[in-house]
Image (spheres, rainbow, N blue to C red):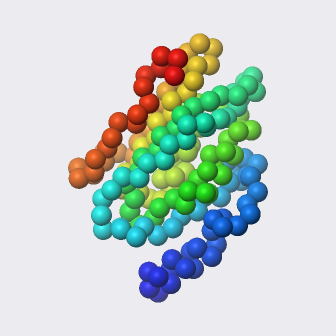
C-alpha cells in the first residue's frame, strides 16, 4: 500500500468535512489521526485551547482552563476537528483538573505514539486557588525547539 493510498483510505473515515454531532462525553468522543507527511523530521506541533471547560465533580460548577498541547509527531498527526470535538466533550464532564489534563495527554499519546508530548493545564481558581497541571511523556528530542507555553503564572489571568 502506498502512502498516498493509505492517506486516502484514512481520510474517508474522518469526521473532517462531515456533519458531526458533539460527543456526550470524553469516552464517547472519537479522535482521528492522519499520516504525518514528514515522519523523517523532528518538529513541534502546538494546540492551544484558551476556553477549555469541564465541571467540578463535587459541586457541578464549571471550571475553566487554558490548555497547551505540544507534541513531536512520529507517524501520525491528530486531526484538529476531532481534537476540538474531543476537548469540548469535557463541558458536561465532571472531573478534577489533574484528571482532565493527564487523561487528555494519555489519550493523545496512545492514539499518536508521538516522539514526545506535553500538556499544560492552566486552570483558573477554584476556591481561590489556581491549579496548574503539567504532564509529559519524557524528554523532547534535542533537535526540537520547545517554546515557552506562553501562559503567565496566575495573576488574575
In this image, 62 relative to 82: left or right? right
In the orientation shown, which residue stands out farthest toward the top? Answer: 128
Could you tell me which residue is drawn at 23 percent across and 50 percent down?
A: 142
Q: What percent of the width, then of the height, locates residue 33?
A: 53, 64
Residue 65 position within the rendered picture, expressed as x and y whole percent measured from the top left: 57, 31
Residue 61 in sight from this viewpoint: yes
Q: Residue at x 55, y 45 (%)?
A: 104
The image quarter in which residue 93 lies: top right
Quarter assignment of residue 8: bottom right
How many callouts does the rendering have?
0
Q: Residue at x 67, y 41 (%)?
A: 90
Q: Is residue 104 above or below residue 97?
A: below
Q: Do we see residue 102 in this rendering?
A: no
- In this rendering, is residue 88 above or below 36? above
Farthest residue toward the left?
142
The x and y percentages for residue 121 are 51, 34
Residue shown at 30% from the left, 64% from the top: 41
In the picture, measured across the screen, residue 110 lies left or right of residue 12, that is left
128 above or below 90?
Answer: above
Left or right of 81 on screen, residue 131: left
Counting from the top left corner in percent of width and height, residue 12 is at 63, 76
Q: Is residue 102 left or right of residue 72?
A: right
Amino acid at each position: 500500500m502506498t502512502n498516498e493510498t493509505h492517506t486516502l483510505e484514512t481520510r474517508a473515515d474522518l469526521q473532517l468535512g462531515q456533519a458531526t454531532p458533539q460527543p456526550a462525553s470524553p469516552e464517547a468522543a472519537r479522535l482521528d489521526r492522519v499520516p504525518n507527511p514528514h515522519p523523517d523530521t523532528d518538529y513541534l506541533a502546538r494546540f492551544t485551547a484558551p476556553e477549555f471547560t469541564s465541571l467540578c465533580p463535587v459541586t457541578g460548577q464549571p471550571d475553566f482552563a487554558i490548555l497547551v498541547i505540544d507534541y513531536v509527531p512520529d507517524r501520525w498527526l491528530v486531526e484538529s476537528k476531532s481534537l476540538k470535538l474531543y476537548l469540548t466533550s469535557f463541558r458536561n464532564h465532571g472531573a478534577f483538573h489533574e484528571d482532565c489534563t493527564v487523561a487528555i495527554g494519555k489519550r493523545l499519546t496512545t492514539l499518536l505514539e508521538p516522539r514526545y508530548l506535553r500538556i499544560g493545564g492552566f486552570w483558573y481558581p477554584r476556591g481561590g486557588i489556581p491549579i496548574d497541571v503539567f504532564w509529559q511523556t519524557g524528554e523532547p528530542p534535542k533537535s526540537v525547539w520547545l517554546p515557552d507555553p506562553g501562559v503567565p503564572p496566575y495573576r488574575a489571568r
